[in-house]
Amino acid sequence: MSSDSNPAATPTPCEDVQGDGRWMSMHHRFVSDSKGKEPEVLFVGDSLVQLLHEFEVWRKLFSPLHTLNFGIGGDATQHVLWRLTNGELDHINPKVVVLWVGTNNHGHTPEQICGGIMAIVNVINQRLPQTHILVLGILPRGKSPNPLRDRNAKVNELVQVELASLSYTSFLNVDPGFIHSDGSISHQDLYDYLHLTPHAYQKVCQPLHARVKALLEAHVP
């Protein structure tokens, strides 16, 4: 599928709905932040990445690994794609990029979202051929079973198939089992049934930290 026919895989700046230019300002800040920094790890994605920065788990687990956080709340795949093709990768050469995006692709099919994620993977690989790309599974959302939850699960299936044959990338399902046996999600894990509580970040980040550390140790430039 060409990016022309897939809006999720077409680099698009985020519309300035609020009128304060915040998204573009954050993008410019990331570009200037990256100059003079030599991160080993880059996190990029939506609010689940951005908010991670504010929790203790970031300072404890990820700051010591020399990590930059380029997360912006509300971003869909096409927004991350635009940011990465417009300067955010120009001054850095991390060993690992952690990509977590896709839950905000409203109105897109699982196939389109998978295409968007793969377009981002391709851009990272073209610009940073030595870098390992770790794609995180999209988490379930909503208190009870719903179409977006089904869509996210389908995206994860499709992405795993796409990544299976690529040596420079891997997939990590970071869902520790947020869906209970009755199909519900607890607000103690996802306080608004989308974003993570500090307690849930702990559960997600332990295996993520272990995987990132292992990738850093295995990295051969």
Image (cartoon, rainbow, N blue to C red):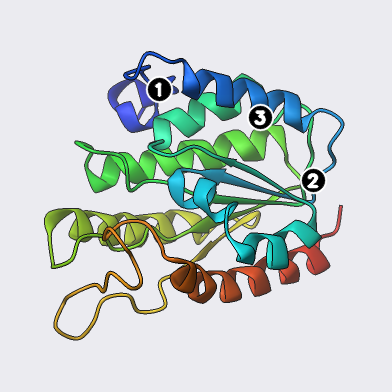
- Residue 26 placed where, x, y %? 57, 26
For the residue marked with disc 2, what is the amino acid?
A: Pro
Residue beneath the point at 46% across and 52% down: 48
Q: Is residue 66 left or right of residue 27?
A: right
User: Which residue lies under the disc numbered 3?
Assistant: 30
Mark 1 or mark 3: which comes first in sequence?
1
Residue beneath the point at 80% across and 61% down: 64
Vertical comparison of 18 with 161: above or below: above
Instruction: Tell which of 9 and 162 is nearer to you.
Output: 9
User: Which residue lies under the disc numbered 1?
Assistant: 14
Quadrant location of the N terminus?
A: top left
Q: Is residue 80 left or right of residue 149?
A: right
User: Which residue lies under the disc numbered 2?
Assistant: 39
* Disc 3 residue crowd, few under 14, some 14–19, many 20+, Cα 10 Å: some
- Residue 188 placed where, x, y %? 33, 73
Query: Judging from the image, what secondary structure is the residue with disc 1 in?
Result: loop
Q: Nearer the viewer, mark 2 or mark 3?
A: 3
Query: Judging from the image, what secondary structure is the residue with disc 3 in?
Result: helix
Question: How many numbered circles does the render carry?
Answer: 3
**Could you tell me how far apart the alpha carbons at marks 1 and 2 are, in whole angstroms?**
26 Å
Instruction: Tell which of 120 and 102 is nearer to you.
Output: 102
Residue beneath the point at 53% across and 46% down: 50
**Could you tell me how far apart the alpha carbons at marks 2 and 3 are, in whole angstroms?**
13 Å
- Residue 98 placed where, x, y %? 60, 52
Which mark, residue 211?
Answer: none
